[in-house]
Image (cartoon, rainbow, N blue to C red):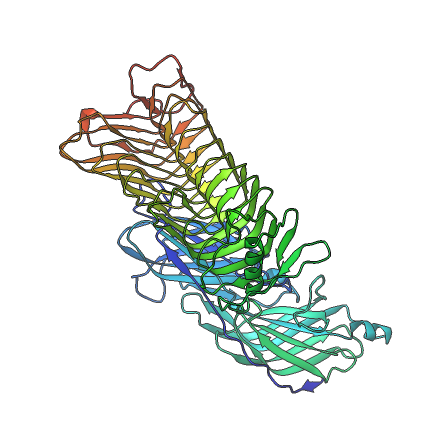
Amino acid sequence: MKKVIYATAALAAMMFASCASEDGITSPEADGNVILTASLPEIGSRAFADGSTATQLSYYVYDAEATGDTKSALIEGTATFEGLKATVNLSLGTGKKYDIVFWADSYGKDATDAPYSYDAASQTVTVTYDGAANDESRDAFFYTLKNLSVTGAVTRNVTLTRPFAQINVGTNDYEAAKEAGISISQAGLSIADIPTRLNLYTGEVSDEALASFTMAALPEGEEFPVDKDTYKYLSMNYILVSADKTTVDVHFISDNASNSDMLFTAVPVRRNYRTNIYGSLLTNPAVFNVTINPGFKTPALEPWDGKTVVEPTPDRNGNYSIKKPEELAGLLQMVSEGADLSGKTVKLTDDITLSGQKWNSIGTSSNKFNGIFDGQNHKVVGLTSALFGHVGEGAEIKNVELEVESTYSALAIKTDGNVAISGVIVNGQVSKSSSLSKYGCSGLVSYAATGTLTIDNCRNNAEIADNAYCGGGLVGRTACPVVIKNSTNYGKVSSTRYSEGKAAGFIGMPAAETTIENCHNYGTIEVTTSKTGAAAGIVGWFNGALTVTGSTNEGDVTLTLSNADAIGIAGGIYGGSGWGTGKKTFTACENSGNVTVKAVSVAATTAAYEKGLYAGGIIGSTSYDDTELTGCTNSGKITAVTEGTKPQKQYVAGLVGAFGWVNSVNITGNTIAESTVLSGNQGEHTAINAIYNYINSPKPDTVVDTPNTNNTSY
């Protein structure tokens, strides 16, 4: 056995971030509706530990005010990670505080062969080390959300981190050793006095024992994490350690006949850090290096000073690679000065921070961006306005994550021409206060003007706050056909426009043919305005052809009209309007969010009964259009409330608040959950029905409504 001494590299600081907003998610009769998005950390390279194996999330909810070393979990559940994210929906008591423990691994809560076992009463995980070495499936993550105060709808994004140190052993003489007759095909590892128990609430470790991994085949298909040279993996293992730096003695064993074991003493380890032991270990095992670095975290980004501009250099095909913020600023300048990037590709090769500096957006009304922008799943952070301004014909924007605090939108202010957007994630906040602008406020596109806008596989996590025109989780306003598929909104969307405010989870106010497929809203939708207002989980106010298929809303939808002298409409999927401008088709859509429409401070001068409030699980109200609902479901609470000196007509229904002067309606195979609550407060002036109301009774022959579930009056 050889014993070696070395010098330790400097440690880098660990980082952890979490954010909170007031978004919510609904379940029937819930006091506090809570949505939690659990995320696993992403790293820049695939050198093991990218989190892809830990697909199973277990969570446990506790009373935060309970005392004692042990306590029972109030709720236990599981979820599955997709794209390193998993969503947990909970109904918790308002006015109470909770601790929520998260644990993620590859085995799942009920696995009998897992090396980890969780004791719910003590909030501890016990680790066993009697398995084979080099097992990536042992990767795991945890986080405890403490003292969550529930006062209403809540959304939190939490990032789980590893309780382990990763210890890697690598060599750069593997092929040379083979030529010299020294072969190695299996390796193992043992380390004395390693903790076996982790308290997920306190983060403390205890109960030390021998961690012994039996010999197994060498890791394959991975790149050893050293920048300059190429090393062959000999070993990769996870051990439970404390959050503070400590040292251990690492005993490496192999089937190498010439040198079957090596001892590395006083090796530094730290939770969520990677320790690398590397050198010419097979031919000269006494010479090696040890480094410790936060390999499970993304390094700090190079900040932009807001002034430096470097024009990126094209390759021989006229395409560009951008690595630094000043090069992104150079792209902005190129496009503003008239560079035509039609058919050319711009790729991000690293994450970029604009450091909160003033950003003028790429593309102007006269010089639009019309190339292909591929973020290659990198991030652009520190945006103060939309990444792109005006985007033109043939443009494609894909695979980029944005962190913003901006106006109008996060990705693009206006699209003119056929534009495709895919794989975009937006975080942060977007707000708009210009009362002169008729552009919307949104996560992706403020205003889609001409051509066709196509959006696929995008997600908005940002809070959207409009007080000028309309708000949409993905798109604000449109004047051209729009298709949105396979996308999600988690962000709260609100409008406080003084008059005629509109907001929705996906498009606030479209004005041309719109198609929504397999899209899901989890964010709360809130509109506070006067006169006519609209709010909905998917599409707000629309005069045109609308098709929504396989889409759901789980966020609360609330519309509040002050001094109302016009209509207010709110729907789980679609707010309303219509006026004979296009067929409205809804297929296999589902709402579980609470839909509420209110009129407050109704003035004595308001004409009694002439105006009205409309609330429906799928549609608030639509008039004069052909309308078709097939296989849709509502389980959300639907409510209308009028406060003021004059009574007001109310239409409340499980599917459609009211149809007005329709051309034809076909309502087939829809379901209203038995738990659904429909309510209004205007007595004889409130119309309530499980499926729909019709403004002009009796029902016309153009309405077909069979078969449906619970098609009876309440």
Q: Single out the residue that lies furthest toward the top.
A: 701
- Residue closer to the observer: 679 or 136: 679
Residue 341 versus residue 228: which sits nearer the camera? 341
Q: Residue 567 lies in what quarter of the image?
A: top left
Give the quadrant of the N terminus: bottom right
Residue at coordinates 66% horizontally, 78% vertically from top-left?
A: 251
- Count all numbered tags in the image, as a single digit: 0
Q: Is residue 465 above or below residue 535?
A: below
Q: Quadrant of residue 112?
A: bottom right
Q: Quadrant of the C terminus?
A: top left
Whether residue 84 is visible here, answered yes or no, is no
Q: Position of residue 632 (x, y in %)?
A: 44, 29
Q: Position of residue 476 (x, y in %)?
A: 42, 42
Side of 325 relative to 282 (left or right)? left
At 64% from the left and 59% from the top, the residue drawn is 321
Where is 287 relative to 58, above or below? Answer: below
Q: Position of residue 521 (x, y in %)?
A: 43, 42
Question: Image quadrant of residue 627?
Answer: top left
Is 447 placed above or below 632 here? below
Give the answer, above or below, for where 705 lies relative to 277.
Answer: above
> Viewer-proximal residue, 624 or 108?
624
Residue for point 65% across, 57% down: 320
Q: Is residue 39 left or right of residue 6?
A: left
- On the image, the x and y values in percent for residue 696 come to 29, 17
Specify whether residue 591 is in view.
Answer: yes
